[in-house]
Image (spheres, helix red, strand yellow):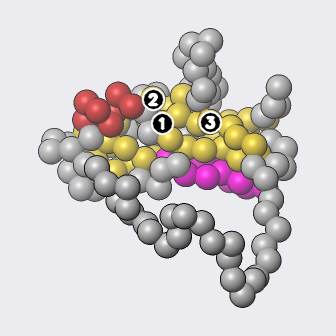
Amino acid sequence: MLRVRIKKLDNAGDLPLPGYATAGSSGVDLVAAVHKSVTIMPGEVVSVPTGLCLEFPAGYEAQIRPRSGLARDFGVTVLNSPGTIDSDYRGEIKVVLINLGKEPFTIKRGDRIAQMVFAQVEKAEITEVAELTPTKRGQNGFGHTGV
């Protein structure tokens, strides 16, 4: 099991630690550590503090992902999804949200705003070559297999 150390900042003192909603949940819920409500207007981007700093082993990352209910019901999602928290980052985790909906969306203190999934990452050895091994697909890109 991956061991994650969490430091709460002053703005998160009364808020719960991230936790899994169910036994089968892949991600832990992150909550807003805002002092007063924040309204995100349609098309607006905001950075929402969580009041948390993390420490976990090298070879892992924390991925910040949208909450499906916020996306479906209100059009609110994580802009840089998934956001990556590197193992050597020790600053506050902030969630970059965008309101793609048609109505203003208000976030209150303690609202669940995103989920965080921990994943193993592998370092790649990068080598420059003159040619790549050919494949049947070749350079055919987006939509090359049809609808």
Q: Where residue 74 sits: x, y (%)?
A: 25, 35
The answer to if 59 sits in the magenta stretch is no
Q: Where residue 49 sits: x, y (%)?
A: 51, 45
Q: Residue furthest left?
A: 102
Could you classify mark 1 by the number of other residues whose Cα lies within 10 Å: few (under 14), some (14-19), or many (20 or more)?
many
Q: Is residue 90 above or below residue 101?
A: below
Residue that appears at 52% across and 49% down = 82
Q: Secondary structure at mark 1?
A: strand
List the residue tagged with mark 1: 114
The answer to if 84 sits in the magenta stretch is yes
Badges 1 and 2: C-beta atoms under 8 Å apart?
yes
Amino acid type, residue under disc 1 in the picture = Ala
| Tag nearer the camera, 1 or 2 | 1
Quadrant (top left, top right, bottom left, bottom right) of the N terminus: top right
15 sits to left or right of 129: left
Amino acid type, residue under disc 2 in the picture = Arg
List the residue tagged with mark 2: 112
Most foreground residue, 24 or 55: 24
Amino acid type, residue under disc 3 in the picture = Val
Q: Where residue 64 sits: x, y (%)?
A: 55, 43
Give the distance between the C-alpha atoms of the residues marked 3 and 1, in whole angstroms.
Answer: 10 Å
Find residue 117 and name its label: 3
39 sits to left or right of 129: left
Residue that appears at 63% across and 72% down = 134
Badges 3 and 1: C-beta atoms under 8 Å apart?
no
Could you classify mark 3 by the number of other residues whose Cα lies within 10 Å: few (under 14), some (14-19), or many (20 or more)?
some
Q: Quadrant location of residue 108? A: top left
Residue that appears at 80% across and 59% down = 123
Q: Where residue 36 sits: x, y (%)?
A: 38, 38
The span shown in magenta is 83-95
Give the distance between the C-alpha atoms of the residues marked 2 and 3, in whole angstroms.
Answer: 14 Å
